Amino acid sequence: MSGPEGVDPVEKAVREAQVATVTSGPGRAVGLLRAALAGAPGDPRLLLALTDALAADGSLEEAQATAREAVAVLPESAEPLVALARVQLKMPGDGIRRAAETARVALRLDPDSTRAHLIVGLAAGYDATATRADRDRARPSVEEALRLAPDLPLAHVVAGVLDRVDDPANAETHLRRALALDPHEPDALVLLAGLSTTEAGTSAGLLRSAAALSPLDDATRLRLEAAVRRAVHRPAVVAPTVSTVALLGAVWLPVSPGILGLLAPLVFLVWGALRVLRAVLAEVPRSFVRRVLWSDRGGRLQTVADVVAPPAAAAGILALGTGDGEGLPGVALVLLASVASAVGGAVVTARLVTAERSSVEGADDTDQRPGAADVAVVAVRAGLVLVVGVLWAAGLVANPLVAAAACLSLAAPLAGALLVAVRHDAGPVGLRRLSAGAVVLALLLGLGGPVAEVVSGGAAERPGGLTWVGAPGGPEARDALRRQQQERREEREERERQEQDAGPGRMPDFGSEPPRAPTAVPTIEVPDFTFDLPGDGDGEATVGP
């Protein structure tokens, strides 16, 4: 059917709806297409166009119903099934899995449907519950799409989505190929920025380019904000980690200057984190950074916490290394650094979850999967807490109260991340359970241990205050160790004072020495050697012949 000027009114309505989507929004396009359908009910072209417009407007349930109408009109065509699969791909819950099933049905009708092959790959790449076997099963579809359309940027983008977890290097190759074909492909920029092989500074630059190409895309803007927050938070992660290691060392060993050796790795790691931060800030406008870090209460809280953590960690190591047996100031500073790091990390994690859920795929993105690094961090911290608990129960812990503080320091970052995960229902359940177990055990040891010490009398008030650094054998042995340390300190101070009083170049005053007691001389008995010699009769011995 043609209009008065020989133009198909259905084609004209579809074209006007496409223009309205760009100029006035998808809502205006929906109105135009509904009006056109009133004049041509059941037209498959109008139904497919209305499906896309409703999906763009966020009305996914209506879009799915409209796509099913198109499938009923064209039951032998793959195009309505592909449109239905595109809508299901955006739906929450099991929409991704249903999209893959619908696309496979479309492939049975048209094995050369490039878009159906790509939907199969997208579903496997974005499904957080998919295993590597599921992704391997979808890989032939992506390879077929690349064979059918080797110069289609979207085909390389989908290949990058599918390989970004199992083969990041191959994913980077495909995404860079997509950008070579279309430098203004925002999805390729965002995906390339999220690869583990991409440096932090390069990632920030890619996200900035993607945000410039899609200024109305809140998801990209939030991802860029998250990149800045993570870079700022990085020094606040490495510094408390080193100070916690120092605290763990003080659990078994008396506080000693040897702990000061940990200042070297702390400075090295913090310097590296600051270099990463500088690379990220070089790619982002200063005004954007100020707005991210200081515009709201969360940003200010993270900024203050991240500024406090590194110097507190360094001061804690310094105090532990120069405490002369009293570790309370160092313990307090290390705990402060760990708590500050946990607060900053909680803000970063919450903003990252918000960024991921604002994207099209929502929380099913790979950032919500249990990455190997995340699992390793939680497992190591949980394992260290368990080790401290076992040694404590076996009586092998030299410093009980320092052990309690070490458990709390280990659990602080896990507790912050766990609170965010529970509040936003984010992250894998297994990782949350492991974190919860470690936090509960750390709280039992960190809070129950000192209470038990007080109840048993081991933490009673002693001369000099509470003993935070002790020795095996209970309170008596710890008191003996403190007295011995005090005596050695007094002897050293007395020796230094005498050397100062003597002055340089003076002979010692021997007269000032206290008088010595007279020494008894031993008596030796000499035997009486008497001999009878021949005499002259007068009692005198004869001398000579």
Image (cartoon, rainbow, N blue to C red):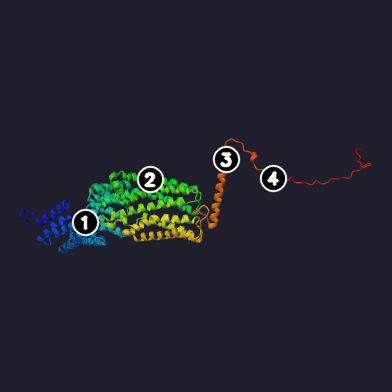
Residue carrying label 3: 499
Calculate the distance from the C-alpha at mark 1 to the C-alpha at mark 3. Answer: 90 Å
Which is nearer the N-term, disc 4 or disc 2?
2
Give the number of the mark in front: 1 or 3: 3
Q: Quadrant of residue 85?
A: bottom left
Give the number of the mark in front: 3 or 2: 3
Which is nearer the N-term, disc 1 or disc 2?
1
- Crowding around mark 4 (Cα neighbors within 10 Å: few <14, some 14 to 19, many 20+) is few
Task: Please tell me the numbered disc located at residue 137.
Answer: none
| Residue found at the very far left of the displayed protein | 4
Q: Residue, x 39% and y 44% (percent of image)? A: 271
- Crowding around mark 1 (Cα neighbors within 10 Å: few <14, some 14 to 19, many 20+) is many
Residue carrying label 4: 517
Task: Confirm or deny contact between disc 3 and disc 4 (CB under 8 A).
Answer: no
Residue carrying label 1: 115
Task: Confirm or deny contact between disc 1 and disc 3 (CB under 8 A).
Answer: no
- Crowding around mark 2 (Cα neighbors within 10 Å: few <14, some 14 to 19, many 20+) is some
Instruction: Please name the amino acid that badge 2 sits on.
Output: Gly
Q: Quadrant of the N terminus?
A: bottom left
Calculate the distance from the C-alpha at mark 1 to the C-alpha at mark 4. Answer: 109 Å
